[in-house]
Image (cartoon, grey):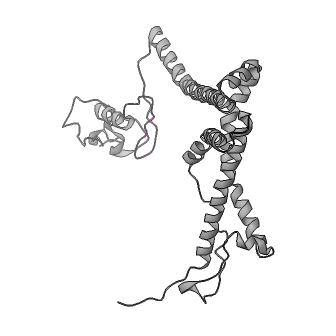
Amino acid sequence: MDDDGKDLRRCWVCFATDEDEPTNPWVVPCQCRGTTKWVHQSCLQRWIDEKQAGNSAATVSCPQCNTEYKILFPPLGPLLQLIENLDRAVNKVCPFAAAGIVVGSLYWSAVTYGAVTVMQVLGHKDGLEVMEKADPLFLLVGLPTIPLALILGKMIRWEDHVLRMWRRHISKISLLSFLLPKMVNSGSFEGLPQREPADPTPLSDPVSATRVLCGGLIMPTVATLIGKVCFGFVESGLHRALLGGITFVAIKGAIRIYYKQQQYIRQAQRVIEDYKQN
């Protein structure tokens, strides 16, 4: 055997030697030494195809020495080179074009929603008249901010701040103690020591993004309906919608505050039972 080990050439893919396949061409594609440096050209081609998984531009390295294989392709003609350059340009532009289409669709959807909301709150005739008299630039900027403002407003958890202040001052003002339940043990829990729930008590329970989105976007419809039912004597459609929205938010907030206070009391009054052997 010589220094290059040519007498012991063995393909590390198929393990065949010169005697098994004397006509199959060999290649030394990496920095490996000894018999592991030899591999059949055809075997290595199949192995590279498996690693690339259809992506001919992917790089492939030797599994032993991690040397990147140098893969050469025949030169492209002028027409094929032009087509390949165009294909690469399209691949680079497509993500930005797709992002622009999505952003544009969201923008015009927001504009449409804002226009529908204006006509819903002010009335179809008055809403169209207001938008026809408004500056076009103001409409293009103002209308899409309507759904954005509604969604951001829905994310404000004002009930949590009110409830924190309520708990802080309920013991100082006797009148407040009649409005919300206090932490008093009763029934099977009577006589047990009071405890403070672990801090922080989860006032701001996680709310799904879909709930925030739907709750914010449906707000003008709910406010308009409540305004027509409860404040039909008000002539202005805008004022009716505002009063209806305030009423809905206040009632919903009061119910939520009461519910969270009850949950807080239940947490404070929980007990751990003795283990009872069956």
Magenta segment: does it hold 61?
yes
Q: Is residue 119 above or below residue 171?
A: above
- Give the image quarter of residue 89: top right
**Residue sitting farthest toward the right:** 172
Percent coordinates x, y for residue 56 in the rendering: 41, 28
Percent coordinates x, y for residue 57 in the rendering: 45, 29
Q: Is residue 146 above or below residue 131?
A: below
- Residue nearer the viewer, 147 or 187: 187
Residue at x 44%, y 31% (from the top left corner): 70
Magenta highlight range: 58-68
- Residue nearer the viewer, 229 or 19: 229
Query: 16 left or right of 91?
Result: left
Q: Is the magenta stretch mostly helix, strand or loop?
A: loop
* Residue 155 visible: no
- Residue nearer the viewer, 143 or 80: 143
Magenta segment: does it hold 146?
no
* Residue 228 visible: yes
